[in-house]
Image (cartoon, rainbow, N blue to C red):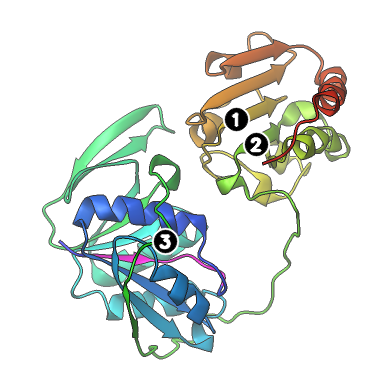
Amino acid sequence: MTALVVAEHDNTRIKDSTFHTITAALEIADENIDLLCAGDQCGSVASDAAKIPGVRKVLVVDSQTYEAGLVEALSDLVVGISDPYSHIVFPHTTMGRNLAPRVAALLDQVQISDITEVKDAQTFVRPIYAGNALATVQTDEDQMVVTVRTTAFSKAGDQGGSAVIEEVSPVSDPGLSRFIGQELTKSERPELTSARVIVSGGRGMQSGENFPLVEAVADRLGAGVGASRAAVDAGFVPNDYQVGQTGKVVAPELYVAVGISGAIQHLAGMKDSKVIAAINKDEEAPIFQVADYGLVGDLFQILPELADELDKQEIKPR
């Protein structure tokens, strides 16, 4: 068995999702792992990738065609180099969920999505029904496309490897899309998918003007700030805050749910957190069924008190 992992990066550094995906790929194909780094002026990414233990070869495709990671161009590239590999593996992130189905369709091969466990090279476990059940799926295909729930696998190391770096020629741009621009939200807070602590607000926050209460607690803990879909749909915060089945799947050491009822779609995105604490005025809220610690009360009174208490404790963000 041989696996090709498609790296997620920003042309300067490898994202954590790739390290978790490599761990899953190593369980599938042992030491027969190659890593594809496609981007523009991404030599530093390739150099860092070569140091990852377990990776035998880094395939580098350096071209302006892949600067913005447009999936129409990337899918043709992945398909073009896919023949030697039994498994083509992606992180189950926005990038992977966009790219993997296109690759699977072009190859006319089966896709197994969002795996949380590797039984063997052809048998995997994945969540269904918003994570309330686990399905064991198996295929006898010689080649398959797999996406990995990154929170289910440990992070691979970033030092000690000695992979060969091989340059690969880009394929022609199909011209199906073009990059216009992007607006990035700059924040000193950690990304949700890699944050050690996350504080999330829900519909109970009542408005976006009240979200600074959540942010004040998060900043004192060095935490990321998340939100339920209800809060995002109501326009309280941007879409990239969303945690849940249709948002980001996270598994921090501590997840604090504030004013979140605990709908099944939200639980699917955070119930693997090591410790869950909930604040809600409704003692019957479903979130308390999964919370390790629960506090029933008025969040508009509790959050300022919590922020003041954290100041007294002199919590130092890590």
- Marks 1,3: beta carbons within 8 A: no
Provide the residue designation for mark 3. 159
Residue 228 makes an appearance in the image: no
Q: Is residue 4 magenta?
A: yes
Label drawn at residue 198: 2
Which quadrant is the C terminus positioned in? top right
Which callout, 1 or 3, points at the residue further toward the start of the chain? 3
Q: What is the CA distance from the residue labelled 3 to the residue labelled 2?
A: 28 Å
Image spot of residue 137 (x, y percent): 21, 41
Label drawn at residue 254: 1
Q: What is the CA distance from the residue labelled 1 to the residue labelled 2?
A: 6 Å
Q: Nearer the viewer, residue 48 or 292?
A: 48
Which callout, 3 or 2, points at the residue further toward the start of the chain? 3
> In the image, 129: left or right of 273?
left
- Marks 1,2: beta carbons within 8 A: yes
* Element carrying mark 3: loop
Residue for point 31% across, 31% down: 134
Amino acid under disc 3: Gln
- 13 lies above or below 268: below
Residue for point 49% across, 81% down: 43
| Picture quadrant of residue 130 | top left
Which quadrant is the N terminus positioned in? bottom left
Q: Is label 3 or label 2 in front? A: 3
